[in-house]
């Protein structure tokens, strides 16, 4: 196939599908840093023109990262479902875009198609789509998961309650948990990023969170977001682990820089399943991703950062997670320079993850040295909520005092509920009404209505 296009009087030629993919991407600082970005808007348009005529089948015939040298590529190829792919096998990327935007691309049709799509296919089509296109298609794809409650139902938005503390002080963590619960947050997960990797301290944190959930009979799940090997050790020491967390990337080399392999993730999943702590389901994994991770590890193999990110979703899909979220602006302006790039990346990630069948959330965030502010995050959270986001972050004051970045708050979620009529996970919503936090319509009641609950949750467990 000829990989060239003429724009005006200039002809642009591309050496490979990998180059076309990179130069068709919307401008972002990470691709510029890697030397992969289009040199001009004209070249970017030419690359998109070429990409639109690429048959979807070519992504199976011309692998961007070799099968022999990358276990993520092997996972993608070996897990591909030809029968599910058959309905779009004859289409080009441009024709696939048109089909996705048509009435034929119903929720059920997308669900049937999902196992037949590879990350490279969905990354390619996203490069031809406007922001509204990404939102429209993602909204049609409903992905529901369960552990102690049900996340991802249409018309619902869950919140990860993120009670981080700069010294892992249990009292400070529990205070933030109570703050979030009283503001109706925490149905996705109560998840702490610990400062320490000390196993005894991690076991202690698991017990603290489990005790709060048990005392309040709260239909939610907890997670201590440490490395998967630490979680395996904590399980061996009897920690009450609900969800196993791990950051993942889209290449074997990048995952090895995180200290993980696909085999290790499978071992951790089996360990969590063996505890049988779920009550309504058994989705026990929680993954976080972010554009730029493969580049920062010098493990991108010349593949653009958005396509590498989509490949991470193939890793996540293998383990049927409860939650997956792109921590979209966390890595910094070297990869996503400003609010415009962060917003576009968040919509791309959500679209690609949903199309691959994942329960996508987003940490709508930025670092303080990026050219972005909270208005940009307001815009992105509203766009993602309209697009059917499964969950978002709830950080006290939107300012994480341990990780030192800016995210979204408990109050931001309340704004989205009021604007868009979004509900919480149904089991959690019923609990909030039962304990007097919200009324029958999901609106917060005055604080004095739930003082007894606050006092009951405040009592800290004895050291494990």
Image (cartoon, rainbow, N blue to C red):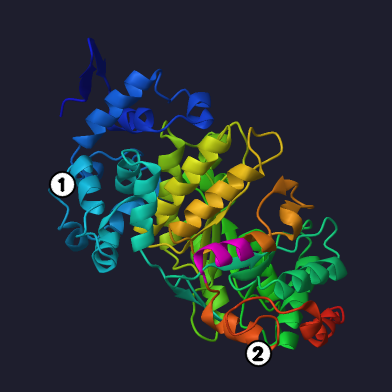
Q: Which mark is residue 14?
A: none
Can residue 13 be seen here? yes
Going by the image, does 460 lie left or right of 408?
right
Q: From this view, report whether residue 3 is shown above or below residue 181.
A: above
Residue 229 picture location, percent across and down: 64, 61
Q: Residues within 10 Å of mark 2 (few under 14, many from 20)?
A: few
What segment is highlighted magenta in the picture?
Answer: 413-422
Task: Choose top left, top right, bottom left or bottom right for residue 170.
Answer: bottom right
Which residue is located at x 52 percent, y 31 percent? 30
Going by the image, does 372 lie left or right of 354?
right
Can residue 329 be seen here? no
Indicate yes or no whether the magenta region holds residue 421. yes
Residue 216 picture location, percent across and down: 72, 86
| Of 315 and 155, the residue lying toward us | 155
Judging from the image, what secondary structure is the residue with disc 1 in? loop
Residue 58 picture location, percent across and down: 20, 41
Which residue is located at x 75 percent, y 87 percent? 215
Going by the image, does 4 lie left or right of 119?
left
Q: Provide the residue designation for mark 1.
A: 91
Q: Provide the residue designation for mark 2.
A: 434
Q: Residues within 10 Å of mark 1 (few under 14, many from 20)?
A: some
Judging from the image, what secondary structure is the residue with disc 2 in? helix
Indicate which label's residue lies in the foreground, 1 or 2: 2
Residue 174 picture location, percent across and down: 80, 72
Which residue is located at x 41 percent, y 34 percent? 303
Q: From this view, report whether residue 39 is shown above or below residue 291.
A: above
Indicate yes or no whether the magenta region holds residue 89. no
Image quadrant for the C terminus? bottom right
| Of 207 and 198, the residue lying toward us | 207
């Amino acid at each position: 196939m000829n990989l060239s296009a003429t724009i005006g009087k200039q002809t642009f030629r591309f050496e490979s599908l990998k180059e076309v993919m990179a130069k068709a991407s919307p401008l972002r600082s990470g691709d510029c840093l890697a030397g992969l970005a289009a040199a001009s808007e004209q070249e970017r348009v030419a690359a998109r023109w070429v990409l639109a005529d690429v048959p979807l089948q070519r992504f199976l015939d011309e692998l961007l990262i070799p099968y022999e040298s990358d276990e993520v590529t092997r996972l993608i190829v070996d897990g591909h479902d030809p029968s599910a792919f058959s309905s779009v096998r004859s289409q080009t990327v441009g024709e696939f875009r048109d089909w996705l935007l048509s009435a034929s691309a119903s929720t059920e049709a997308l669900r049937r198609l999902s196992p037949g799509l590879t990350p490279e296919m969905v990354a390619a089509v996203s490069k031809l789509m406007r922001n509204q296109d990404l939102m429209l298609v993602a909204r049609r794809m409903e992905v529901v998961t369960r552990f102690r409650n049900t996340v991802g139902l249409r018309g619902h938005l869950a919140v990860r309650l993120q009670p981080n503390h700069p010294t892992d002080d249990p009292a400070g963590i529990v205070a933030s948990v109570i703050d979030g619960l009283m503001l109706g947050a925490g149905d996705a997960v109560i998840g702490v990023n610990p400062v320490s990797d000390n196993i005894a301290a991690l076991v202690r944190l698991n017990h603290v969170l489990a005790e709060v959930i048990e005392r309040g009979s709260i239909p939610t799940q907890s997670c201590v977001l440490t490395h998967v090997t630490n979680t395996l050790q904590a399980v061996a020491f009897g920690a009450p682990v609900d969800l196993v967390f791990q950051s993942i990337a889209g290449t074997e080399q990048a995952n090895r820089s995180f200290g993980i392999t696909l085999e290790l993730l499978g071992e951790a999943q089996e360990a969590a399943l063996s505890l049988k702590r779920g009550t309504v389901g058994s989705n026990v994994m929680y993954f976080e991703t972010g554009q730029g991770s493969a580049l920062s590890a010098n493990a991108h193999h010349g593949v653009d950062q958005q396509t590498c990110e989509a490949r991470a979703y193939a890793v996540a899909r293998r383990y049927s997670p409860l939650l997956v979220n792109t921590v979209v602006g966390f890595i910094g302006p070297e990869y996503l320079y400003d609010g415009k790039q962060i917003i576009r990346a968040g919509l791309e990630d959500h679209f690609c993850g949903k199309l691959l069948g994942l329960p996508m959330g987003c940490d709508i965030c930025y670092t303080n040295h990026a050219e972005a502010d909270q208005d940009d995050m307001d815009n992105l959270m509203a766009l993602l909520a309209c697009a059917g986001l499964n969950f978002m972050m709830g950080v006290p004051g939107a300012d994480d005092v341990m990780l030192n970045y800016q995210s979204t708050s408990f109050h931001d979620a309340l704004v989205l509920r009021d604007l868009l009529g979004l509900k919480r996970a149904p089991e959690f919503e019923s609990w909030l009404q039962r304990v007097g936090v919200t009324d029958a319509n999901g609106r917060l009641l005055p604080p004095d209505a739930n003082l007894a609950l606050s006092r009951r949750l405040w009592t800290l467990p004895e050291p494990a």
